[in-house]
Amino acid sequence: MQLATLFGDGMVLERETRAPMWGRAAPGSEVRVRAEWSAAEVVARADARGAWRVELATPSAGGPYTIRVAGTDELTLRDVWIGEVWLCSGQSNMEWKLRPGELGGVLDSEREIAEARHPRIRVFEVANRAALHPASDVRGQWVTCSPQTAGEFTAVGYFFARELERELDVPIGIVDATWSGTRIEAWLEGSTASALDATRAEWQRFANAREALDAGPQQAHELDPQTISALFNGMVAPLVPYALRGFLWYQGESNRSNASQYVELQSGLVRSWRELWGSDAKPFYFVQIAPFAYEDDGGETGALRDAQRRCLALENTGMVATMDIGDPLDIHPRNKREVGRRLSLWALARTYGRTGIVHSGPLFKAVRFEGQRAHVTFDELGGGLISGGDHLTGFELAGEDRRFVRATATIEGDEVVVVAKGVLAPVAVRYGCRADAQPILFNKAWLPAAAFRSDSWPIR
């Protein structure tokens, strides 16, 4: 008898829910599960393939507990905590570690690691794996946060967890399923990929190749981590349906070349992951990509940022802007603490119902054009608009010729008024769309405005 690897010593289970627990045993055998917090024993019978599953009614936050699982043999899970669990996924900026080195290094990393004494924060890092078919299990283990272990944690996930633990006073579990440099297509569930216009042809090529491989000699197949659905199969499918509160996502840099498809791709991912976890409104909070001087940029970065913003049309999503904390010379900006904090603001306000929290920077609402002037309005004013310097930057205007010109912008009440020399009759406005732009529009909570385009013109 065995448990799925997610269920191990030191794990965190989602509180006040029916948390699934599963594994394998001899076909037809009985499996009995007893959690220390409950007098009731839960019983399952392994099916013809040996798979079994139970649901544990979890209490309010607490621990440590033990869970005993008995079948043909007996297992005991120790140091089990009940609290809040979030799945972190995406590419390198989510994978980025606290410790310095390859794929790691944050501001004040030595101090941050030395102060990482949070035994109620636990992280399960899913080992990198690309797979042809949905896998049944993952490799990894739950690790307790301490100065000896925290250096290997996802930095964004850690700082998010630290804020939640402090504010909610409960244990926090982070499941880290990330792979640097990967495109969103690799994280799509198969039936979703086959249904989306953006990936239907790519999925068919993959399906044909997979069929040929399946028909050939039985051998291990090395897959490119960019292969459509390969990372979903290897790293996400085996996590379903582990009880989660929500999802955190930081990805997009590798999809700049097909930014026009990104709304469909991310929206498809959100819907499918929610469906798999049994909730069409499970929170999904994500990060708009930061400033960086891409050598090959021809407008793709601005289009990708705006596509991310448009994904907010989905219910119960939230986006963190990073226009003020990026580094044009480093695609991996080091201020991950603020990224994690800003994600926690969305969770605290929207998921946990905390009042009085400004959780977002200004978000583009509308624009009206009057002569040479563009009047831009925003949602999420956070007490009002302010500039982080002497002059607002990052705004551009275009007329019917679709040629964008750097503009002058001023705050007038709750609007930003934008004008540009030579643009006598503007029809479109953009903000923060140049790849390395670091504009300085904020609300009074010092949360930055998100990049946006009022147009949907093709990228030149």
Image (cartoon, rainbow, N blue to C red):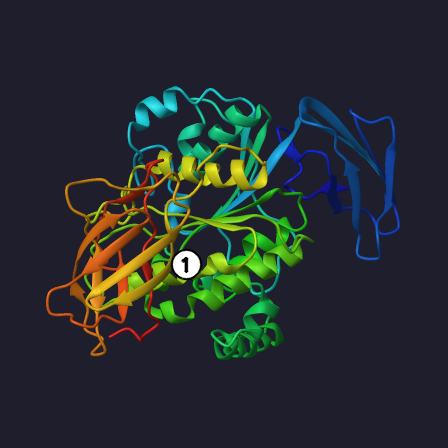
Residue 400 vertical position relative to residue 376 in the rendered view, above or below: below
- Camera sees residue 448: yes
Q: How many marks?
A: 1
In the picture, measured across the screen, residue 34 lies left or right of residue 459, that is right
- Camera sees residue 220: no
Point 59% across, 27% down: residue: 171
Judged from this view, the residue extending furthest toward the left is 421
Number of residues whose C-alpha sits closer than 10 Å to that of mark 1, classed few (under 14), some (14–19) or many (20 or more)? many
Point 21% across, 69% down: residue: 371
| Element type where label 1 sits in the image | helix
Q: Position of residue 182 (x, y in %)?
A: 40, 58
Residue 139 vertical position relative to residue 119 in the rendered view, above or below: below
In the picture, measured across the screen, residue 304 lies left or right of residue 299, that is right
Point 47% across, 37% down: residue: 345
| Residue closer to the observer: 76 or 188 | 188
Kindly indicate the quadrant of the structure image that contains residue 61: top right
Amino acid type, callout 1: Gln
Kindly indicate the quadrant of the structure image that contains residue 315: bottom right
Kindly indicate the quadrant of the structure image that contains residue 258: bottom left
Quadrant housing the N terminus: top right
Point 20% across, 79% down: residue: 401
Quadrant housing the C terminus: bottom left
| Residue closer to the observer: 348 or 183 | 348
Q: Position of residue 194 (x, y in %)?
A: 57, 74
The residue under label 1 is 308
Q: Position of residue 59 (x, y in %)?
A: 74, 29
Residue 19 vertical position relative to residue 51 in the rendered view, above or below: above
